[in-house]
Each structure stands twice: as C-alpha cells, then as structure tokens.
Amino acid sequence: MAVDMKPIATYTERLLEVRREFVLYEDQVIVRARWLLKGSFENVVKLATLKSEIQELTIRYRVYRYAGWVMAIGALGFAAAYYRAGGGPMGIPGHIAMGVMILA
C-alpha cells in the first residue's frame, strides 16, 4: 500500500479499557487497539485473504459477569431500604441502592 493513500472509511469505538480504530483501504483493513494499562496493538488484514463464510461469535464485555451480582445486591439493598422506610421516604441509602441497581 502506498503511504499517500487515503482511507475509504474509518470506524472508531471507545470502551472503558480499550479504544479501537478500524481503517478501511481498497485492499486492506488496519486495526489499531490501545488498552488502558496493557499498551497498544496494530494488525493489518488483507481483504484478499477473507472468506465469505459467516461464523457467529459472541463477545461479552469483561464486566458482564459481575453486572448480575451488582444488580442483585442493589435490588436487595433497595428492597431493604424500602421495607425499613415503611412507605415513607427511603433516605440516602435507599437512593444509593437504587442507583447501584440501575447502573448495573
């Protein structure tokens, strides 16, 4: 590839711990990733080497496995604060528990 070639398209995504950039050229895709604490990575994928077979792959975000537990703890805390309030105002602990539950 010539150095002066302009990309056809660029896609960028940002997550908590990684930033990825996919740059599409006429004959290849350049993938760049930069992790928060692990450094950076670059890979070139030649378009001629790609096959037309479709293979599905599910990738879950790393904190996905903890989200259910955090949501359950937040719901339990919210239920306890609501029960303790007896229909009145829940106070700060109830609102914090509700926030944790919603955030998860």
Image (cartoon, helix red, strand yellow):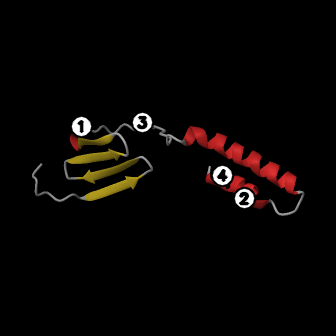
Q: Residue furthest right?
A: 86
Please tell me which residue is depicted at 32% across the width and 46% down the height of the picture: 34
Q: Is residue 63 left or right of residue 20?
A: right
Q: Are marks 3 and 4 in contact (CB under 8 Å)?
A: no
Which residue carries the number 4 mark?
100
Amino acid type at mark 3? Gln
Q: Is residue 52 left or right of residue 76?
A: left
Which residue carries the number 3 mark?
55
- Say which of 91 and 26 sits in front: 91
Depicted 14 relative to depicted 68: above or below? below
Q: Is residue 23 left or right of residue 57?
A: left
Q: Are marks 1 and 3 in contact (CB under 8 Å)?
A: no
**Which label's residue is closer to the chain start, 1 or 2?**
1
Measured from the top left, where is residue 85 in percent x and y?
86, 57
- Say which of 77 and 15 sits in front: 77
Q: Residue furthest front?
A: 92
**Which label's residue is closer to the chain start, 1 or 3?**
1
Which residue carries the number 1 mark?
49
Measured from the top left, where is residue 44 in percent x and y?
23, 42
Q: Secondary structure at mark 1?
A: helix
Alpha carbons under labels 1 and 4: distance apart: 46 Å
Quadrant in which residue 9 is drawn: bottom left
Q: Are marks 3 and 2 in contact (CB under 8 Å)?
A: no
Depicted 55 relative to depicted 82: above or below? above
Measured from the top left, where is residue 89 in percent x and y?
83, 63
**Which label's residue is closer to the chain start, 3 or 2?**
3
**Which label's residue is closer to the chain start, 1 or 4?**
1
Number of residues whose C-alpha sits closer than 10 Å to that of mark 1, classed few (under 14), some (14–19) or many (20 or more): few
Which residue carries the number 2 mark?
95
Q: Secondary structure at mark 3?
A: loop
